[in-house]
Image (cartoon, rainbow, N blue to C red):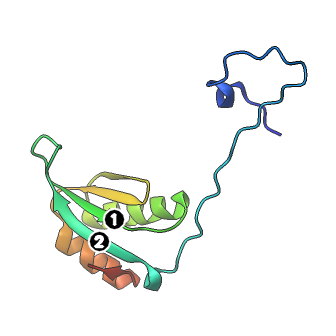
Amino acid sequence: MNNDWKDRLGVVFSTSSDFNYNNPIEPENNTLPPKQQKLQVYFDKRNRKGKVVTLINGFIGNSNDLKCLEKLLKTKCGTGGSSKDGQIIIQGNCVDKVKSILDSEGYKVK
């Protein structure tokens, strides 16, 4: 068992002599194949100080596969971006380019 102190930052103190902190680990989703993914691609500029971004929603899978898809899109679009919680954010209005890249990779795109 990895008993790193950083995992216990929420626990203040325990007086129990038999206390053993167990860090709840949430299992990640298995990644669906590209043909079963239904991704939504659109651009947005609300709450972004007027900057336009391309959003890709609906990815079902683990965080490593999400990061790989994010890296592929950022490389092919030549822009920056990020990903979190099944959503990929690409800087700029790259909706058409992202749709064509995802189609060529086998994803279903709306």
* Residue 105 quadrant: bottom left
SS of the residue at dot 1?
A: strand
Task: Decide: is 88 above or below 19.
Answer: below
Which residue type carries mark 2? Gln
Numbered label attached to residue 96? none
Q: Which residue occupies the foreground of this view, 98 or 77?
A: 98
Residue that badge 2 annotates: 40
Q: CA distance from mark 1 to mark 2?
A: 5 Å
* Residue 97 quadrant: bottom left
Provide residue 12's location: percent of width, then percent of height: 67, 17
Provide residue 66's location: percent of width, then percent of height: 46, 62
Tag 1 and tag 2, C-beta contact below 8 Å = yes
* Quadrant that contains the N terminus: top right
* Residue 13 quadrant: top right
Task: Decide: is 82 above or below 35.
Answer: above
Which residue does the image show at 52% across and 66% down from the upper left? 61
Residue that badge 1 annotates: 57
Question: Reading the chain from its start, which is encountered first: label 1 or label 2?
Answer: 2
Q: Residue furthest front?
A: 16
* Quadrant that contains the C terminus: bottom left
Q: Residue furthest right?
A: 18
Which residue does the image show at 25% across and 69% down from the upper left? 41
SS of the residue at dot 2?
A: strand
Which residue type carries mark 1? Asn
